[in-house]
Image (cartoon, helix red, strand yellow):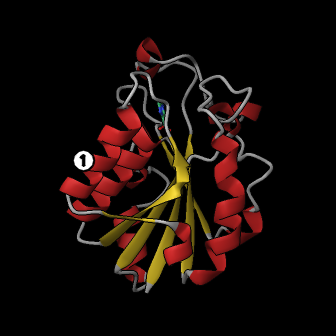
């Protein structure tokens, strides 16, 4: 059984947002198109408190209950079975969807019989990276969908380095057309 893990397709990571990636919203139509191929669809939200050490490193973004923290309107939310919230603590970054605080993601996926996960969303070099690395560590067969991710790219090449690291640590990187 396989699950799609949609990471942080939220306004603040898309064009015009507080921490915009280039063309972040372009992942949405790709995700909408493939969602029916999965037994389960989980979407994470970066869901920060007003004050967090995370904002010492990053512009304020995805504050709980704000417009910036909502899913981008291009993402069809009808496809989502379960939303998970992460980054909710004020003492850490909470990049990975496996750090969700509203449920234990590993237990939830295993309870649904999921053994394989496909990771997509934003951002390639932070939350997608952490989620894919954790998925492998938690024992899931892990795929990353290369045309359904976008990077922050603080330094040129960050996206490529993240993809290389995901591959080195056990994820397979594929295109949505290969699913
Ligand atoms: C993210 C940078 C800061 C992400 C979150 O969703 O990848 N990146 N906070």
Image location of residue 117, percent across then percent down: 41, 71
Q: In this image, 74 relative to 53: left or right?
A: right
Can residue 66 be seen in this snapshot?
no
The residue positioned 71% from the left and 31% from the top of the image is: 15
Q: Is residue 34 shown left or right of residue 99?
A: right
Q: Residue furthest top?
A: 56
Q: Is residue 118 above or below residue 168?
A: below
Q: Position of residue 101 (x, y in %)?
A: 44, 49
x, y percent for residue 104: 39, 61
Asked which quadrant contains residue 138, the reply is bottom left
Can you identify the residue that label 1 sits on? 165
Side of 130 relative to 41 (left or right):
left
Taking the spot 33% from the left edge, 68% from the top edge, the residue there is 142
Q: As displayed, is residue 121 above or below residue 35?
A: above
Q: Is residue 50 visible?
A: yes
Query: Are there few (<14), some (14-19), or many (20+) residues within 10 Å of tag 1?
Result: some
The x, y position of residue 64, in whole percent, is: 64, 34
Residue 39 position by quadrant: bottom right
User: Does 177 appear above or below 126?
Assistant: below
Q: Secondary structure at mark 1?
A: helix
Q: Is residue 36 left or right of residue 124?
A: right
Q: Residue drawn at (55%, 77%), measured in percent from left and top?
A: 40
């Amino acid at each position: 059984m396989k699950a799609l893990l949609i990471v942080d397709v939220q306004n603040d990571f898309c064009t015009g947002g507080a921490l915009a990636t280039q063309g972040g919203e372009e992942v949405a139509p790709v995700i909408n198109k493939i969602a029916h191929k999965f037994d389960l669809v989980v979407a994470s939200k970066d869901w920060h408190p007003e004050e967090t050490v995370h904002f010492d490193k990053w512009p304020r973004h995805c504050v709980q209950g704000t417009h910036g923290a909502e899913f981008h309107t291009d993402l069809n939310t009808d496809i989502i079975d379960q939303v998970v919230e992460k980054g909710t603590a004020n003492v850490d970054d909470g990049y990975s969807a496996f750090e969700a605080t509203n449920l234990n993601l590993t237990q939830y996926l295993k309870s649904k019989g999921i053994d394989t996960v496909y990771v997509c969303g934003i951002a390639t070099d932070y939350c997608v990276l952490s989620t894919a690395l954790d998925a492998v560590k938690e024992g899931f067969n892990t795929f990353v969908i290369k045309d359904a991710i976008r990077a922050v790219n603080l330094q040129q090449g960050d996206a490529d380095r993240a993809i290389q690291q995901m591959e080195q640590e056990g994820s397979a990187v594929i295109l949505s057309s290969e699913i």
